[in-house]
Image (cartoon, rainbow, N blue to C red):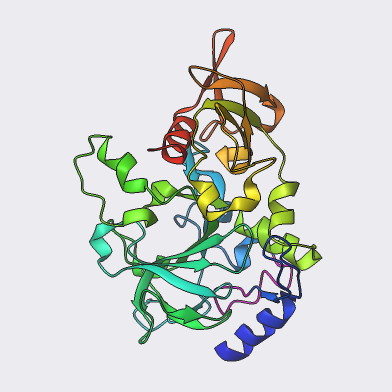
Amino acid sequence: MKIFYAITLLSFFTLRLTHECLGDKEALYLSWPTPNPAFARGMGYHAFLEKTGPDKKFSSGAYGCVRNNGNKFHEGVDLSPISNMASGKASDSIFAAMPGVVAYINHAPSASAYGKYIVVEHFNTQPTLYSLYGHLESVNQGISVGSKVQASQKIGKMGNTASFRIPLDRSHLHFEIGLRLGGRFQSWYDRQGFKTKNLHGNFNGYNLVGLDPLLFYAAFKRSSKNFPQAYIDSLIPVAKIRVPSKSPPQILSINPCLANNFDKSLNYESWTCTFGKYGIPLSFEPSQVTCIKPEILYYDQNEDQEACRPVLVKRGKDLFLSDILNTYLEILFVE
């Protein structure tokens, strides 16, 4: 039955799309990461999201400012099981969302709030996306760093592992789809004075910026040329920040399609960085304008109303970069 559902969802979400930045004609496949068909059938949150407690709303398992009365951000979605063992432990398999390569596996539950988790790099998408599968009970045999996986391929078992206690009856998959800020995360981390060691290299949660998976899947269902680039382009810009830097942001080494009017043969003094809601990086454009500190060029306050993860903050009459945006810029432009 689980295999049937996986195949059903895969065919439901399959489109043939052109990756214009790569110049290829390869099909992109997108599969739901659990056997639950509820989202594909248009059912509500109650049918596929795991809420944070018996007295909480199902929306507490969604993406965004959904935790602690809207004061805590949730980077992905928590997907509930459709089958459980007698103990209450989930028995669902977990499937890769898209074709890609396993970039990272954390086997030590206590080493991360994600517990045992897998990160898959989807190198055939533009921009390059990363999907994360957290709180796993186990990783499938034969799945290791460097393994190529196909959409709907089994990669693990749903569980409740984490550095904190998740009750058995709340076993679920924490699922993210997003962008990686850069390849020199450790350099940034070493400068922060954190008391804990970075055990996850470039696949630390600080370096992964999640999109809303449900909106992402819904956009795919509607179909779009050059997906997911077209999806990124459809997101509303919230702020544009000019950043002093002669070097391009780290993200462009992974995602050159996020650059506008970038001629590598020229020298630049700064970069105009465009961010969407929650600080999602949308595009980057070089400039000959000199500045000595980040400058706010544009701000859409109407699109930045979520108190738990603002892009900019107002103090008195003045606007300032939020802590999260400062962090993202530091990681993007780390030397």
Q: Is residue 221 above or below residue 261?
A: below
- For image coordinates 80% across by 64% down, the residue present is 222
**Residue 219 shows up from this direction:** yes
In which quadrant of the rendered image does the C terminus lie?
top left
**Residue 92 shows up from this direction:** no
Say which quarter of the image contains residue 23: bottom right
Q: Is residue 312 above or below residue 8?
A: above
- For image coordinates 68% across by 24% down, the residue present is 298
- For image coordinates 48% across by 45% down, the residue present is 250
Residue 320 within the magenta-colored segment of the rendering: no
- For image coordinates 68% across by 84% down, the residue present is 8
Say which quarter of the image contains residue 42: bottom right
Q: Could you say where residue 164 lies in the image, as x and y percent from the top left?
A: 28, 56
In which quadrant of the rendered image does the N terminus lie?
bottom right
Q: Is residue 286 above or below residue 38?
A: above
What main secondary structure does the magenta stretch of the protein show? loop
Q: Is residue 284 left or right of residue 173?
A: right
Q: Is residue 183 left or right of residue 175?
A: left
**Magenta highlight range:** 31-43
Q: Could you say where residue 11 lies in the image, as x and y percent from the top left?
A: 72, 82
Residue 39 within the magenta-colored segment of the rendering: yes
Q: Could you say where residue 276 lies in the image, as x and y percent from the top left?
A: 64, 39
Closer-to-camera residue (102/160):
102
Closer-to-camera residue (332/48):
332
Q: Could you say where residue 318 lies in the image, as x and y percent from the top left?
A: 57, 11
Q: How many marks?
A: 0
